[in-house]
Image (cartoon, helix red, strand yellow):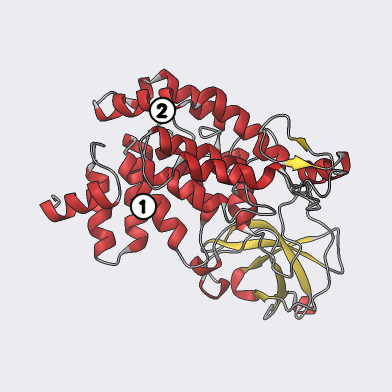
Amino acid sequence: MVLTPNQIDHIDNKLQLAGYPKSHFFTLGFKLQLGGLIDLAIDAFKRGAKEVSCVPSMFCYGELQRLRVGGNVPLALPFYFEAAIRGHIGSMSRLIQLYQESKPAIACALITFWMKMKIEFDDTTNTEESRKEIKKQFANICYVCKKEKSEENDDVTLVKCGICKLYSYCGKDCQTYHWQELKHNCECRQVILLRKYCKPSYVKEIREAIIGGEDPKKIHTLQRLRMKLGLNRPEEDYKELLLTLANDDDNKNNKDTMKRGTHVKVKGLVKASQHNGKFGIVTKVLIPGEGGRRRVGVKLSDDSDTVLNIKIENLELSSKSATTVTNLPNRPRNSYSNSNSNRPNPYEYLIARKDGTVHIGSTTNTI
């Protein structure tokens, strides 16, 4: 299976992937995508990224995850990151785009970092003037309360964030609110990591080595950066988050899988018919049962000490009026949105964890 000259031209120019080695997994995924077989294409791109460190596969895997209905952005981001630290400008652009949508606040410090990186790579879509203009917008105004310092209003004293040097605050209360409630502590700590381990000269060195055919596993600068950013974190560290962020569009009528934290209503039980119509919450996912893993653990709202193993066929999504169930044990902090949805807002997981690393790593293996 080979790519046509027109397809290669499209990949190299439009996707900005010229020079990067293209694995057979990438070629397969590209053909599958053209044929509309998106799930198979995602699997092929994922294998290309994980098994042979194929940068084109990393980018295209991110693209397909991002563009899926509902947007699997937390799954897309680490693969964009993997490609960006290998010098791929298109992935840097995607990171900027995602940070413009991050919650609970736009990650402007990370946006300006990746804009600067693109400029260092002579990308013309961003300029130093546009980057400085963004920084200027925050120079004379408190980011939180919007108090502005001007010639007419010289009573306002602003202090910049001591780390990122981007945001300004009129006082400690506003700075604390931004740091804690708007998660700037996470953003700032990732900025520290990037400035120290992701210098433009390092990324250029990594890019040249990969294009030159060097094994990425042996590029010390790359592997150190991956470790510092948490891209090689074991999947067990974020497996719970993956389950919570599972896309409902991959879950036709909730029959194939149930996510931990889903509010459900029991129906159609025979041996335990007294539970029919009761509300509960999924606490364990896909417990082995008759005929395979078709059962989940459900904690009923009127029996907090018991978790029933129930077939998925005997559950349906509960209404908004369902009785609230006691919080799940070991529930990750800020895992769930405050809205009526059982799923968190995926854009809350675009910035970083409290230590500055990504929320979801790309693979347990070194790539």
User: Who comes first in sequence, dot 2 or dot 1?
Assistant: 1
* C-alpha gap between disc 2 and disc 1: 27 Å
| Residue that numbered label 2 is attached to | 203
Location of residue 101 in the rendering, given as x and y in whole percent from the top left corner = 58, 56
Question: In the displayed structure, does residue 91 sit left or right of residue 308?
Answer: left
Say what amino acid the circle numbered 2 marks. Val
Q: Which residue is mark 1?
A: 43
Asked whether, in this view, residue 193 is left or right of residue 69, the answer is right
Residue 188 position by quadrant: top right
Q: Secondary structure at mark 1?
A: helix
User: Would residue 362 be seen by someone viewing this image from the given angle?
Assistant: no
Q: Is residue 31 left or right of residue 227?
A: left
Circles 2 and 1: CB distance less than 8 Å?
no
Query: What is the x, y in percent for residue 183?
Result: 72, 45
Residue 145: x, y in percent?
A: 81, 52
Q: Tell me residue 90's x, y (percent).
A: 37, 46
Residue ID at (68%, 39%): 186
